[in-house]
Amino acid sequence: MASTPGILSEWPWKPLGKFKYLILAPWVIRSTYMYVTKEDPRERDLSTFLIFPFLLSRMLHNQIWISLSRYRLAKGNNRIVDKSLEFDQVDRERNWDDQILFNGILHYLVTHILPNGTNVPTWRTEGVIMAILLHAGVVEFLYYWLHRALHHHYLYSRYHSHHHSSIVTEPITSVTHPFAEHMSYFFLFGIPLLTTTVSGTGSQAVIFGYVTYIDFMNNLGHCNFELIPKWFFYVFPPLKYLMYTPSFHSLHHTQFRTNYSLFMPIYDYIYGTVDKSLEDLYEMSLKRKEELPNVVYLTHLTTPESIYYMQIGFPGLASRPHDYSSSKWYLWFMWPLTALSSLLAGIYGRTFVVESHRFHKLTLQTWVVPKYKKQYFLQGQKSSITNLIEKAVLDAEEKGVKVLSLGLLNQTEESNAYGEVYVKRHPKLKVKVVDGSSLAAAVILNSIPKGTTQILLTGNLTKVAYAVAFALCQKGIQVASPKDDEYKKLKESFINVSSSAETSNLVLTKKYFQKVWLVGDGMNKEEQVKAPKGTIFIPFSQFPPQPFRKDCFYYCTPAMYTPASLENLHSCENWLPRRVMSAWRIAGIVHGFEGWNEHECGFYTTADIHKVWQATLRHGFQPLPITFSCLEV
């Protein structure tokens, strides 16, 4: 909100919450019914019928800009402002679609109030020309002075400061304003639309074309990366005064008292309010190259819908943990787009960047393998996935990356021997491949309640499970395995790394009386039923167990809180809450900070667990509360 909110700051339908979209339902139903039931094509009001599809297209238009902007900013090329974007800005800009709803209501009202508001023709040349002239000569001029007025202390503190709270702009920052401010903007933008409609020169081209132009230019000016090439202004020099650039408007958000124009800088040039550093910033942004990371976290898609929960997806979803047990109702209506994204992921066939962070001297990036969780278990996909991961390792080597940590199913014994395959194939690798098992094991060991004397270990065994079981046995804690094959594997691993002394604390049991369970993938409901009331389930797998017992406690997958100095963190990692990262991801960051000159990959290669844990704490990462569960989010 603004620093001292004025009247009409809140949107009138805010109390409706998620049901705010229903305010358009009567209009949409009526216009659709009237269009479908008319037998004579000449009586069908196409222009009114198209209002709702146009509103949906506007949402898609804005979302394309959001995804493009976040993708480009993650790569770093042509970035304008380097400051951090945080969760508070994402929350503040969550209602960016309110202005589309407001615009839709106004469209429908016009069709009922004005005599020329219905059955609008597709094209009227005189109306198009009139709209262009009115925008350039009236709307731009009035907006310039309105914008300057909004920067007066009285109006700025009550309204416009809400918009300027976002120093690092995103496309949807352009429409983040209090309701009263939006009313004034729609009054201005309505001048060309209402004038052409009343004069009988209106057309669908003017109505839909003009609003699309406003959306395009708004998104362009707030995208925070420069994309207007210099030759654009060499070909037609007057464009300098008729079209702004992202650099132009970015300066308004950082300097505040310059570059007030809407889309045409001509009035800033006339009244002498152009920022003097404009040319330098524009040149510098255009020359800025793609940012080279120091540490890369290599993850993958989990479900076809998971793309929406990533930073380049929907801001509202990306800023909250992904609940895999339920799906947002509106995502069901997006199945064509979901199917298209799945198809493009398969065609693209290489990793892509989704996040970029700054942590003191390190630049961090997250790369995504375009494969889903189910594909990792398909025999026909294993070769393709292995090649994609190897290609990512070689790309990281070429870019000079110091550390690449393997996340989720990109590191398993079956697929690549916890990354060891790539190290053996390329023995001269300078980039250090990290599977993060040591830190994951350390997080689990420090999550076990003090005073625990026995635990039960079940589920598909992993490198982390072996390391944790061995460390617990060394401490004198009894580790019970309920399955013969798992027990034999654990016992053999103990003998391979030490004497048989530790095996005395490893037992085979068919009794499920232990109150602390270490669980991995493969634990089923039948096993959960056997657990005593109040049992604590601590997962050692990358994916959390499916909760079944309401009288038990389910801990989060190995993860830690990130320090405040880790910048530009405004999306959640899968099911983890805000500002929490998985241990496998943090392990790569710590490896890069410490400058450790060895790989941490392969089944028998595990770094000193205590050493990794202490280094992680030293760099500001903090353990989650002992009773913390992902279910609490």
Image (cartoon, rainbow, N blue to C red):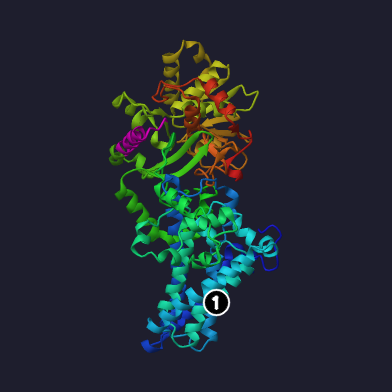
Left or right of 336: which side holds 567? right
Residue at image coords 65%, 25%:
450
Q: Is residue 227 above or below residue 495?
A: below
Residue 186 % position (x, y): 56, 73
Give the main secondary structure of the magenta stretch.
helix
Residue 25 in sight from this viewpoint: no
Instruction: Depth check: give the residue in front, 536 or 431.
Output: 431
Residue at image coords 55%, 77%:
106
Which residue is disc 1 drawn over? 106
Q: Secondary structure at mark 1?
A: helix
Residue at image coords 38%, 61%:
233
Instruction: Depth check: give the residue in front, 585 or 207.
Output: 207
Residue 512 % position (x, y): 56, 29
Q: Is residue 16 above or below residue 201?
A: above
Span colored in magenta: 385-402
Find residue 597 and report its image quarter. Answer: top left
